Image: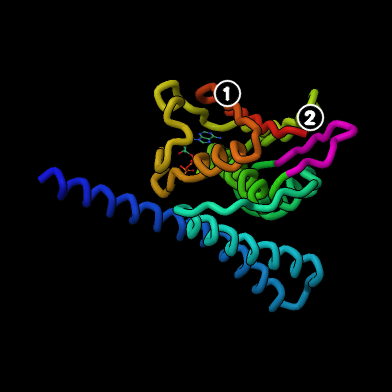
Amino acid sequence: SEDFYRKADKLNAVGQLAAGLAHEIRNPLTSLRGFLQIMQSGRVNKKEYFDIMLSEIDRINSIVNEFLVIAKPVRTKFQKQDLIHILHSVITLLETQAALNNIEIRTKVEDGFPLVECSEMEIKQVFVNILKNAIEAMPCGGVIRIHARVQEGSVMIRIADEGVGISESQFPRLGEPFFTTKEKGTGLGLMMCYKIIGDHKGGININSVVNEGTTIDVILPA
Ligand code: ADP
Ligand code: MG
């Protein structure tokens, strides 16, 4: 019956959400495990690793919270943050994965870049999701260019990759929950980005040319 199908749909959505949650948590866990292994070997700058590990644990916590509060959203705390510092911490996290794929990440920051009122954890998640997509779009390597610009009343972080690009037919579906073209994708990353940047009263613009690359502009009020 129709009712049966509706229930099956719902169960499927819950299953997909669970898969997404597992995926999001596995990343920081994998990174934590890697750092612990390096530390076990004894040849490390412990302070830096502790900092990264603590922030990874915070990230798992915030991911779990995000999913727990889906039905009952609570306001996250917005504070003036150094976006460039957040960006660099994300780059540090993803650098190994990028290097393994022959990808170089170049960053250019305009003078006078201001502090931005935002939730550090959420913005970190946005950068992770966008940069991971860029890395995943460049199976043959290349350069990811990040340009942080100051505009009238806002800031813009442009992240441009040299990847496979997005076809016209896929374009309207970007940000739709569970829309993915990847075998192991969840299709939750961009949806999260849109939601988070929307909560910050900012915007996301995506431009893409198939086989040339994709440019994603994240705009936040400043
Ligand atoms: P996932 O990465 O799990 O597939 P996302 O929501 O992060 O989910 O992305 C949804 C889809 O958008 C991807 O499967 C891909 O088709 C497309 N996409 C996103 N970013 C890029 C990019 N930088 N280059 C090419 N395609 C992209
Ligand atoms: Mg993704």
Dot 2 corresponds to which residue? 149
Determine if residue 84 is in view. yes
Under circle 1, the secondary element is strand
Report the mark closest to the observer, 1 or 2: 2
Q: Position of residue 108 (x, y in %)?
A: 80, 34
Comparing 142 with 1, the one in front is: 1
Q: Nearer the viewer, residue 142 or 27?
A: 27
Whether residue 147 is visible: no
Disc with the residue nearer the chain's start (1 vs 2): 2
Is residue 116 on the magenta stretch? Answer: yes
Q: Report if the beta carbon of the residue with label 1 is closer than 8 angstroms to ligand 1.
A: no
Residue lying at 40% horizontally and 43% vertically, measured from the top left: 178
Look at label 2 and name its amino acid: Arg
Q: Residues within 10 Å of mark 1 (few under 14, many from 20)?
A: few
Image location of residue 186, percent across then percent down: 43, 47
Q: Residue at x 72, y 35 (%)?
A: 146
In the picture, residue 195 is in which quadrant?
Answer: top right
Q: Amino acid at mark 1?
A: Asn
Please name the residue shown 36% across and 52% down the image.
16
In this picture, which residue range is highlighted in magenta? Answer: 105-117
Residue 65 drawn in magenta:
no
Q: Quadrant of the C terminus?
A: top right
Say whether residue 49 is left or right of residue 214: right
The residue at which mark 1 appears reads as: 207
